[in-house]
Amino acid sequence: MKLWKGATFAFIVCGAALSVLLTRNMAAIGQFKPRTKYPHASSASSRSPSPSISSSRTAPPSTPWSRTMGGPQRRPRQTRRTKRARRPKPCSLREMEVTVSELGLGYESDETLLFRYCSGKCTGHRRNYDITMDHMRRTGFRKKGRKDKVSNGPCCRPIAYEEDISFLDNRSRYHTIQDVSAQACGCV
């Protein structure tokens, strides 16, 4: 009976060692792609193999330990984006260069202007009203049967506009428009 136990133990140890050896060799030549918790983080391994890996397929290493000692190296995985990187930007003034036609006011002109606009989140400016409206939107309005669209927080909006914008349209007519480009932004 002791002989069978010893033989079973030896087979288990040899099987585990063989499994580890095969997994390492297959991963080194790119045939085995281990599953990860975040599949998008290993997108580098789903691309075509690098030249160093493909060259190891054609020419076998000169020594059995060359893969581990100084053979082809695997690329480091991409790291996951942190929550800090995804944090929304605060309400601020942004700008872009557009033509007058792109403003959507019905004018046809190829003149360009620097359009300033407000964008961002206003989470730090929430007041009791905003918190109450958020709660009522989630619970209270449903119970009362109301389906009104309500804002549950302050919005990033212009609090001041630049002076009038004057331009010449494609038919050589002069136009002046007001309250188009923001000068300052705030949470309203």
Image: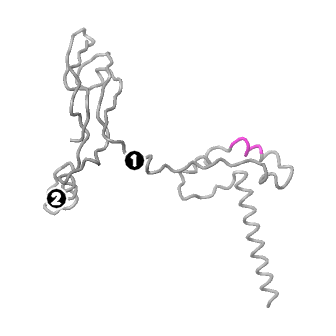
Q: Quadrant of residue 51?
A: top right
Say which mark, if any, is on residue 141: 2
Which mark is first along the chain, 2 or 1? 1
Q: Disc 2 residue type?
A: Phe
Quadrant for the N terminus, please.
bottom right
Q: Report if the CB atoms under discs 1 and 2 are less than 8 Å apart.
A: no
User: In the figure, 70 relative to 138: above or below?
Assistant: above
Q: CA distance from mark 1 to mark 2?
A: 30 Å
Nearer mark to the viewer, of 1 and 2: 1
At a point 30% along the width and 39% down the height, the residue shown is 91
The segment highlighted magenta reads 50-55
* Residue 167: image location, x then y, percent: 25, 14
User: In the figure, 127 relative to 6: above or below?
Assistant: above
At a point 74% along the width and 47% down the height, the residue shown is 72
**Going by the picture, which residue comes out furthest to the top?**
172
Quadrant for the C terminus, please.
top left
Q: Is residue 111 left or right of residue 55?
A: left
* Residue 103: image location, x then y, percent: 27, 25
User: In the figure, 38 relative to 163: above or below?
Assistant: below
Q: Disc 1 residue type?
A: Arg
Mark 2 closeness class: few <14, some 14–19, many ≥20 residues within 10 Å: some
Q: Magenta-highlighted stretch: main secondary structure?
A: helix
- Per the image, the residue denoted by label 1 is 87
Q: Along the line of sight, which residue is nearer the eye, 82 or 62?
A: 82
Q: Is residue 96 left or right of residue 45?
A: left
Q: Quadrant of residue 5?
A: bottom right
* Residue 101: image location, x then y, percent: 29, 21
Label 2 residue SS: helix
Q: Quadrant of residue 16?
A: bottom right
Q: Along the line of sight, which residue is nearer the eye, 11 or 115?
A: 115
**In the image, residue 57 lies in the stretch drawn in magenta:** no
